[in-house]
Image (spheres, grey):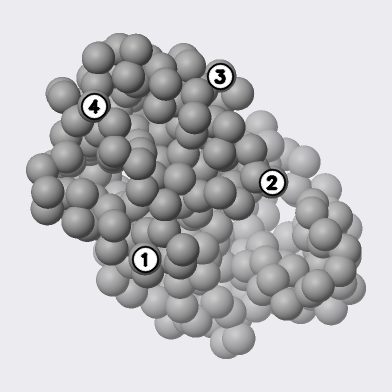
């Protein structure tokens, strides 16, 4: 590997990505790599620049930011064989944790890139959009939709306020879930589709998911009361919610989700309103990894 392209989002991690990008770039050059920096003004611009870097023969693309920026990179990198490196500088950094990339240590993350160890992983695809971690629908996506409409408060508190507002008006959501081998009609609070294990900065919603098995983990949570839903969320950080009676997990290659008034988010990015078709695409992504993903 000789040349890497460093993609930066200046707004990731509350603006810390510029500093992380500078440290990462300096370290990559110390390790003997030629570095080209790109920074898109918009999502479409960033995706175009990554596509041009791939067409120009870059040996790897390094995303300096969070899961949203990585999601942008996937749209141009999927199925190209060009590996993605990660220098975590976001809020959640679920891709980085999934792939064994050091969080909070840009020099160590840059060394993972320079060491050049690659692995092929599955990606999810929903409505023609690639994703690496989790597609969310239901209560969690309703919270994100509300938070994105709010102008106050700022930061993490905005999501807390949005969560309380949605919790007050929460009603069971009627889902139709079409899996490879069965169709389910259920009332649930949320349905998540895991290619990876976690979302939201370490919430292990699909703890048994693997990025190398060619399958998706569909997690259906149907707590009977608001209180049960509130009690469920702390268990998600450990992944122990899957042991509860109100949670079911199904493994499938494809799934179609239908529910009224629900929008799907993947890697934290807005995808499309339901109904939506989701599939696992084996080996669609190539990554530079610290620890080979399970």
C-alpha distance separating marks 4 and 3: 21 Å
Give the residue number, with chain letter if any, for mark 4.
34
Residue under the image location 56 percent in, 67 percent down: 137
Residue 102 visible? The answer is no
> How far across and how far down the image is residue 93, in percent?
55, 38
> How far across and how far down the image is residue 180, in percent?
27, 64
C-alpha distance separating marks 1 and 4: 23 Å
Q: Residues within 10 Å of mark 2 (few under 14, many from 20)?
A: few
Task: Please tell me which residue lies in front, 180 or 71.
Answer: 71
Asked which secondary structure carries label 3, the reply is loop
Quick check: 86 above or below 140?
A: above
C-alpha distance separating marks 1 and 2: 21 Å
> How far across and how far down the image is residue 72, in percent?
39, 57
- Labels 4 and 3: the sequence-earlier one: 4
Label annotation for residue 105: 3
Asked which secondary structure carries label 1, the reply is helix
Quarter location, residue 237: top right
Quadrant position of the N terminus in the picture? top left
Asked which secondary structure carries label 2, the reply is helix
Give the residue number, with chain letter if any, for mark 2.
14
Q: Residues within 10 Å of mark 1 (few under 14, many from 20)?
A: few
């Amino acid at each position: 590997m000789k040349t890497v392209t460093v993609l930066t989002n200046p707004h990731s991690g509350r603006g810390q990505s510029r500093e992380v990008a500078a440290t990462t770039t300096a370290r990559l050059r110390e390790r003997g790599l030629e570095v080209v920096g790109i920074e898109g003004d918009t999502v479409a611009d960033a995706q175009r620049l990554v596509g041009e870097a791939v067409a120009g023969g870059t040996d790897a693309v390094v995303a300096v930011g969070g899961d949203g920026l990585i999601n942008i990179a996937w749209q141009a990198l999927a199925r190209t064989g060009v590996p993605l490196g990660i220098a975590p500088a976001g809020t959640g950094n679920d891709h980085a944790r999934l792939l064994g990339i050091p969080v909070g240590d840009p020099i160590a993350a840059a060394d993972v890139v320079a060491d050049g160890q690659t692995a092929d992983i599955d990606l999810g695809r929903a409505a023609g959009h690639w994703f690496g971690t989790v597609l969310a629908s239901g209560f969690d996506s309703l919270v994100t939709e509300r938070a994105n409409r709010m102008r106050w408060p700022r930061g993490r508190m905005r999501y807390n306020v949005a969560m309380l507002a949605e919790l007050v008006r929460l009603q069971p959501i009627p889902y139709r879930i079409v899996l490879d081998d069965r169709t389910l009609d259920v009332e649930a609070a949320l349905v998540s589709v895991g290619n990876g294990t976690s979302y939201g900065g370490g919430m292990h919603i699909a703890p048994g998911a693997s990025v190398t098995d060619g399958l998706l983990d569909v997690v259906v949570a149907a707590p009977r009361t608001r209180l049960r839903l509130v009690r469920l969320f702390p268990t998600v950080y450990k992944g122990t919610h899957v042991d509860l009676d109100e949670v079911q997990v199904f493994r499938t290659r494809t799934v179609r989700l239908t529910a009224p008034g629900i929008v799907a988010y993947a890697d934290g990015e807005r995808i499309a309103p339901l109904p939506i078709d989701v599939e696992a695409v084996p080996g669609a992504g190539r990554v530079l990894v610290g620890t080979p993903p399970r």
